[in-house]
Amino acid sequence: MDELSRILGSVVANATPLVIASIGETITERVGVINLSLDGSITLAAMLSFVVAYSTGSAAAGLLAGMLAGMLIALLIVVASIELRQDQVAVGFVLTMLAADLAQFLGQNYTRRPGPTFPTVPVPLLAEVPFLGNFLFNHNILIYFSFLLLFATWYVMYRTRWGLALRAVGERPATAFARGTNVNRTRYLYAALGGALVGLAGASYSLAIKAGWANPPVMRGDGWIALAIVIFGGWHPVRVAFGAYLFAGLRILASTIQQTTDFPLVLVNAVPWVLMILTLLMVSSGAVDWLMRFTPRRLRWVVRLLALFGVRGQEETAASRTPGRLRRVLRNFLRSDPPGALGSTFSRE
Amino acid sequence: MTRESIPARRLIGIGVAVGSIAVALLLTALLIVAVNASPRDVFDKIWEGVGLAGGRLDMPRFSGVINFWIPLMLVCTGLLVTFTAGLWNIGVEGQMVMGAIFATWVAQEVSLPSVLLVPLEMAAAALGGALWGLLAGVLKTRGGVHEIFGGVALNNLANIFGIYLISGPWGNQGGQATPPFREEALLLPASSEFRVSLVALVMVGVAFVVVVMALRGTHWGLELKALGKSARSALLLGVPTQRNALLAMAICGLLAGIAGSIRVLFTYGNLRPLVSGGIGFLGVLVVLLTGTRALWAPIVAFFFAAIMVGSTRLNIALQLDQSLAGVVQGILVLVFILANGISARLRARRQAPAAEAASIPPKEAAHG
């Protein structure tokens, strides 16, 4: 039991950058902007936070530098999209390549050095609770922040007027505009916030979870995984966070299996990418219908069961067969369509 | 409504390009200063690495640029097809690796005279790349997985598979690489001075000309263009969108696979980890920069190849990380995209008052 609690604790810790980055991206995409630069942004933010923390001796200063870097990259994408009418995906792709190379180049004199980190701060009393203590309350403050972030994002997005405006801008910008929302200003605001969170995720690697800076960077690839988790999570912060924890958990499981058996390590490295393809297949609405067509009638319940975990078919999902309130709740939970205006620009004419 | 003449527009285009290069170089110089190095030294070393130092051409070094340009150009040619079809084939990197793996398999397992073996290796590479490209395509058309995500995952899987083969079944050099291939399995250089494979060079030329002509002059090229502009409209117009998307992915994969085979059969002479050397991603940048102006691709690709090859000297001579090459290229493409946006916006602003004046109906104008 104690062992399990510790393992779960390490899953929570390892998932934290993914949780923060994918919630940041969820906010960005919910307002209609695709920030494809995550992989590069996270790497650059991790490098800058480490270098600033190392030079000033303050982890907090490093954190701010990382957030600033993430925010600037996100703003660059929004400016290119809103003001200059350039493709968000193109700009984001260039930025992901550029930021990663920039991190490697500018960080070349700072590799493999010990620097300031965020220490573990057990929550008084709660850390002593059996099981839950090590699981949730014996971490550094970035991890506590990710819990808070998850709750706050959900609350603001679904329970406040601001959240309504945010979602409206991403779904139907013209309608939001007619109702008095300044579409472009809202996009600037939330894309900057989302970008800052992506930067924070980068900082949480180099200042806490995988402390330090190395060449090649240890977090390369995680940005793409965070982007995939947003899709897997159906652009809903709670499901996105669930996806991030699930992902980190499976990754730790794979490396534990590798340590106890002679399963080749290189194949363990393949696990995240296989998972990425499988999860994206699962949430795409076409996949479940396609799967149903090729599944023998007697085995179709398996597909339906899978559907409960986030697959949404066009007709035969579990949700459409469940009556009443439960059905509504399920349908909400299974929602996996992108925001209506994702990646588009809005102009008044 | 006043329209700019074509020469004026071309002049603006050149201005944007030159301005972007200048801004990109300036930004890069600032970054070099930031790591306490001298931009002047860096420039000299890159120039030297390309083989152009001291006013005379250092042929073996210059050959290095061409050897990098050949696979890059094959990748760019393939990407022109997917780009026209509106597909973000980021998986091109993995398609190269798969090509390299398939070529290695033939090189290790088959013994034939060179005239037969090398074409067989390349055919296998083309098949491997095409299959990997097709897989990303099927994931998109059948599975609803966007090609960017399918591509990223398949890139990593191809690289991991390569590393697995090298460290396990195929490797005996401490997991660093496969044993060197036999002489008859390799592509050979033209001469000891001009160390470039003529076979590969000819293949690049043929592939580029065929693809550009097919895209510009055939009905199929038109269909791809329609698909790229709007998949939905293309479908409504009767274009077989899924089949064309898959075909585009397969063709790009095929060319990338051949590019991968050139890396193992010529550049290295064996299979190594990360055998693609980032050429696939670089190809995406080149195609982003040139867009559909295909004839610029060879020139831009050559320029990028020179930066890439030249900066390998930085590590040895100045202890600078060679990621500088990626930084220069990335900044250049970014600045160019932004500059195009700025120029279009300025043009729109300048034309707006004129357009307004022109759009007043003649009747009202007569009244005034």
Image (cartoon, coloured by chain):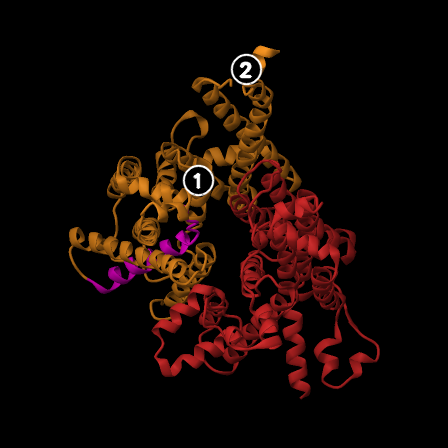
Chain colours: A red, B orange
Residue B277 left/right relative to A123: left
The residue sitting at 51% across, 80% down in the picture is: A257
Please determine whether, in this image, residue B146 is positioned above or below residue A85: below
Q: In x, y percent, where is residue A97?
A: 53, 48
Foreground residue, B110 or A183?
A183
> Which mark's residue is nearer the viewer, 1 or 2?
2
Question: Is disc 2 on the same chain as disc 1?
Answer: yes
Residue A83 left/right relative to B16: right
Q: Are marks 1 and 2 in contact (CB under 8 Å)?
A: no
Q: Is residue B196 visible?
A: no
10 Å neighbourhood of mark 2: few (<14), some, or many (≥20)?
few
The secondary structure making up most of the magenta span is helix
10 Å neighbourhood of mark 1: few (<14), some, or many (≥20)?
many
The residue sitting at 24% across, 43% down in the picture is: B199
The count of marks equals 2
To which chain does the residue with label 2 belong? B
Q: Earlier in the sequence, mark 1 or mark 2?
A: 1
Residue interval drawn in magenta: B86-110
The residue sitting at 65% across, 85% down in the picture is: A3
Q: Which residue is mark 2?
A: B363
Residue B286 numbered tag: 1
Q: Is residue B338 visible?
A: yes
Q: In x, y percent, where is residue B304?
A: 45, 38
